[in-house]
Image (cartoon, rainbow, N blue to C red):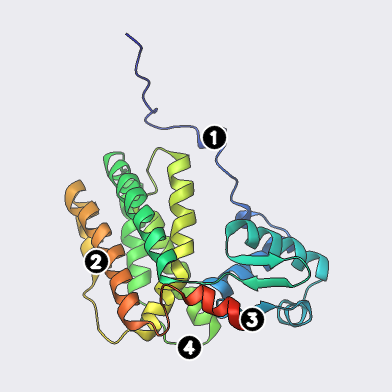
Amino acid sequence: MAKILKMPETPDRSATTAPQDVLREDAATFDVLRQMREDILCCVLKPNERLRFGELRQRYDTSVGTLREALSHLVSEGLARTEAGRGFTVAPISLADFLDLSELRVYLETRTLADAIRHGTDAWEAEIVSSYFLLSKLAAPRQDDPVSVKREWRKRHKRYHDSLVATCTSPWSLHFRSELFDQAQRYHWLTMIHARSRRKNEHLELRDAVLARDVDRACGLIESHIRTTVEQAASEVPGLTLDMASKSRRRSG
């Protein structure tokens, strides 16, 4: 019989071929990329918005060459679009896209979370507690809040969710889970600022279930957290319909 190979308990993540996180690199291009990415994810740069180099140079105080490199990264991530002769635009959104993203997120979030709980450490627990505390100190941002407030809330929100799965042993699962999480943030953001109904503290419930090492409850809570956001977005975000992207293309054409 063939021998079944198992993942090592503490894999060497430096040896994986999972894509490099360039946002951690210290260079001018990546600094501009980080800023533009945050502005897209917080909807400061809105879906379908034309990205004109003159305006971008002024906003980010950088060169056209640096902007082109940053925009190429954003296109490869799916956060921007480019067409020959028409330049760059922020990627569109639609309910169909959000549903697709969310189904994949449920699949990956539950699996990475279950694995992280099984391999959790004291340091992992400490980071969950501290990241939740920092997130809880900030109220959910409003549409008219300064960009700095929006960026700080998103930073803390991402840190909290990343902490939950930090001890997952699969670098590829963590990579794809992180990509999907970021793609969903624009929808999450629009849902928050247009929300007419208040939700219970799902982050607190999730924290407690994870710290209790209750895999079934924790996975059920993260699935509900994702699906509830989709339902809320579908009913409360103006114009978020299945044909939103196609309507936008007809208007821009």
**Residue at x 55% of width, y 40% of height:** 18
Q: Nearer the viewer, residue 211 or 45?
A: 45
Height in image: 109 above or below 102?
Answer: above
Instruction: Tell me, for residue 204, which label it has, or none.
Output: 2
Upstream in sequence: badge 4 or badge 2:
4
Q: Disc 3 vs disc 1: which is toward the camera?
A: 3
As measured in the structure, the alpha-carbon distance from the residue carrying label 1 to the one carrying label 4 is 40 Å
State yes or no: discs 3 and 4 in contact (Cβ < 8 Å): no
In-image side of 24 versus 138 (left or right): right
Residue 133 in percent (x, y) is at 33, 68
Q: Nearer the viewer, residue 39 or 52?
A: 52
Instruction: Decide which of tag 1 and tag 2 comes sooner along the chain.
Output: 1
Q: Residues within 10 Å of mark 1 (few under 14, many from 20)?
A: few
Q: What residue type is disc 4 on?
A: Asp
Say which residue label 4 marks: 145
The residue at 29%/87% (across/down) is: 196
Of the numbered discs 3 and 4, the one sitting upstream in the chain is: 4
Give the quadrant of residue 3: top left
- In this rendering, position of residue 18 left or right of residue 237: right
State left or right for residue 166 relative to residue 60: left
Q: CA distance from mark 3 to mark 2?
A: 43 Å
Residue pointed to by mark 3: 252
On the image, the x and y values in percent for residue 249 come to 59, 76
Q: Nearer the viewer, residue 137 or 169?
A: 169
How far, Cα to Cα, is label 4 from label 2?
24 Å
Location of mark 1 (residue): 16
Secondary element at image label 1: loop
Classify mark 3: helix, strand or loop.
helix
Instruction: Depth check: give the residue in front, 61 or 129.
Output: 61
Q: Position of residue 85 (x, y in %)?
A: 79, 70
Q: Residue at x 43, y 61 (%)?
A: 159
